[in-house]
Image (cartoon, grey):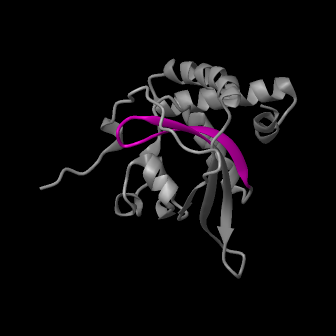
């Protein structure tokens, strides 16, 4: 019997997966974040087949070095039926990683009912990654101070909001300033 892939058991390798600046990763999810569509670029970078991805939570590619509070911000923004841009560190099935600049938008039907989410991701420039990594490292350190992952996420979320307030920018404005 073939063993099912569990991303929580994957160990990061420290190797970056190469992909082209002209490529776009595309995926769609339902309202609970389960993948309903993945393009070939997504499948290649994640090192998973369409069959392995469809129906799985989008966090199947979550890298453990990605602050949870950024996903809280993402879901909070989407719940308000607004789009969001975010730098995200993803992890392939092998444990290799790849950075993306994600643009996530709500999807609506003809009656304007929310039906799911659509995400396009592009490859960020190395300089952009170098600028976001220190912030993400700070947020991860804050999360690690707490025994409860939820408490850690909330503390790092508040830290992120304070940092943005001190800079006088929204998260999207911060992302675009990098």
Relative height, residue 170 to residue 166 (above, below): below
Q: Is residue 64 magenta?
A: no
The residue at the point 62 percent across, 19 percent down is: 138
* Residue at figure coordinates x 39%, y 48% from the top left: 47
Name, please, the residue furthest toward the bottom.
110
Please provide the residue range marked out in magenta. 83-100
Q: Position of residue 116 (x, y in %)?
A: 59, 65
Residue drawn at x 43%, y 25% is: 14
* Most foreground residue, 130 or 75: 130
Give how far across and how far down residue 69 sits, in percent: 60, 35
Indicate whether 149 appears above or below 38: above
Q: Say whether residue 98 is magenta.
A: yes
Q: Residue at x 47, y 37 (%)?
A: 17
How many circles with numbers are drawn on the protein? 0
- State left or right for residue 77 relative to residue 43: right
Q: Viewer-proximal residue, 147 or 96?
A: 96
Q: To which quarter of the image does residue 91 belong?
A: top left
Instruction: Indicate whether 2 appears above or below 127.
Output: below
Q: In the displayed orientation, state which residue is furthest to the right.
A: 168
Report the side of 154 relative to 91 (left or right). right
Taking the view exactly as shown, the residue that stands out farthest to the left is 1
Q: Choose top left, top right, bottom left or bottom right for residue 164.
A: top right
Q: Main secondary structure of the magenta part?
A: strand
**Residue 16 locus on image (x, y percent):** 48, 32
Give the position of the N terminus as an image quadrant: bottom left
Q: In front here: 88 or 126?
A: 126
Residue nearer the viewer, 23 or 138 = 23
Q: Quadrant of residue 93?
A: top left
- Residue 65 in picture, x, y percent from top left: 50, 28
């Amino acid at each position: 019997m073939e063993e099912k892939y569990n991303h929580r058991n994957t160990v990061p390798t420290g190797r970056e997966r190469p992909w082209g600046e002209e490529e776009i990763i595309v995926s769609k999810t339902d309202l609970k974040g389960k993948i309903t569509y993945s393009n070939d670029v997504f499948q290649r970078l994640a090192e998973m087949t369409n069959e392995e991805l469809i129906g799985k939570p989008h966090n199947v590619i979550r890298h453990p070095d990605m602050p949870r509070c950024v996903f809280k911000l993402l879901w909070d923004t989407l719940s308000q039926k607004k789009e969001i841009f975010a730098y995200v560190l993803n992890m392939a099935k092998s444990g290799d990683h790849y950075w993306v600049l994600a643009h996530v938008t709500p999807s609506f039907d003809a009656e304007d009912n929310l039906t799911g989410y659509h995400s396009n991701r592009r490859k960020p420039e190395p300089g952009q990654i170098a600028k976001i990594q220190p912030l993400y490292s700070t947020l991860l350190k804050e999360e690690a101070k707490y025994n409860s992952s939820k408490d850690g996420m909330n503390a790092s979320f508040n830290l992120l909001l304070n940092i943005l307030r001190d800079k006088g920018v929204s998260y999207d404005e911060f992302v675009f300033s990098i």
